[in-house]
Image (cartoon, rainbow, N blue to C red):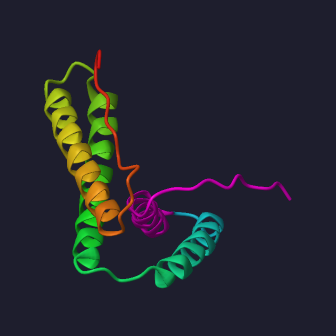
Amino acid sequence: MAEGVNITIGPGEFIDRLTILRLKREKARTAHIQEVLAQQVFDFEDLRKKMQDKLGLKDLELALETVNRKLWKAEDEVRRLGADDPTDPALAHVARRIAAMNDERARLKTGIDGLFGWQATEIKIYGSE
């Protein structure tokens, strides 16, 4: 069996990954994929239970899950629109929405990091920055 790589991530990144795993498990179409994801979610949920419940964490986690759901739908929309007509002006509109949602996602992850005093928060770099 191949071994994974251990890395240190902040609580915001951890909660983000957990919400995405939950969403993937929900969206998976094959039993095998559902089984693999179910084990990953179980492992992450076990770690989540060990995290101290800071005031406001549950609200930030729910907000992060909501943003990730919206991102999933928007990315599906981009794939659909691009397949139908790659020049469709609606693609630009959806891309702007995705950018705004990713900014919100970064803000929420940084908020979670702040609850735990984690200094290495989400850093976004755009264009020529």
x and y percentages locating residue 38 in the rendered image: 58, 74
Q: Quadrant of residue 22?
A: bottom left
Judge whether 4 appears above or below 11 on screen. Answer: above
Quadrant containing the N terminus in the rendered view: bottom right
> Is residue 30 or residue 66 the one in the foreground?
66
Q: Residue at x 38, y 60 (%)?
A: 12
Q: Residue at x 28, y 36 (%)?
A: 78
x and y percentages locating residue 109 in the rendered image: 31, 57
x and y percentages locating residue 11 in the rendered image: 42, 64
Q: Quadrant of residue 126?
A: top left
Q: Residue at x 29, y 62 (%)?
A: 114
Q: Quadrant of residue 90?
A: top left
Does the magenta-highlighted stretch encompass residue 125? Answer: no
Residue found at the very far top of the displayed protein: 128
- The count of marks equals 0
Q: Residue at x 18, y 37 (%)?
A: 94
> Is residue 83 or residue 15 the one in the foreground?
15
> Is residue 58 or residue 1 the one in the foreground?
58
Judge whether 115 appears above or below 87 on screen. Answer: below
Q: Which residues are magenta?
A: 1-28
Does the magenta-highlighted stretch encompass residue 15? Answer: yes
x and y percentages locating residue 25 in the rendered image: 49, 68
Quadrant containing the C terminus in the rendered view: top left
Secondary structure character of the magenta stretch overall:
helix
Q: Is residue 79 left or right of residue 49?
A: left
> Is residue 62 or residue 8 the one in the foreground?
8
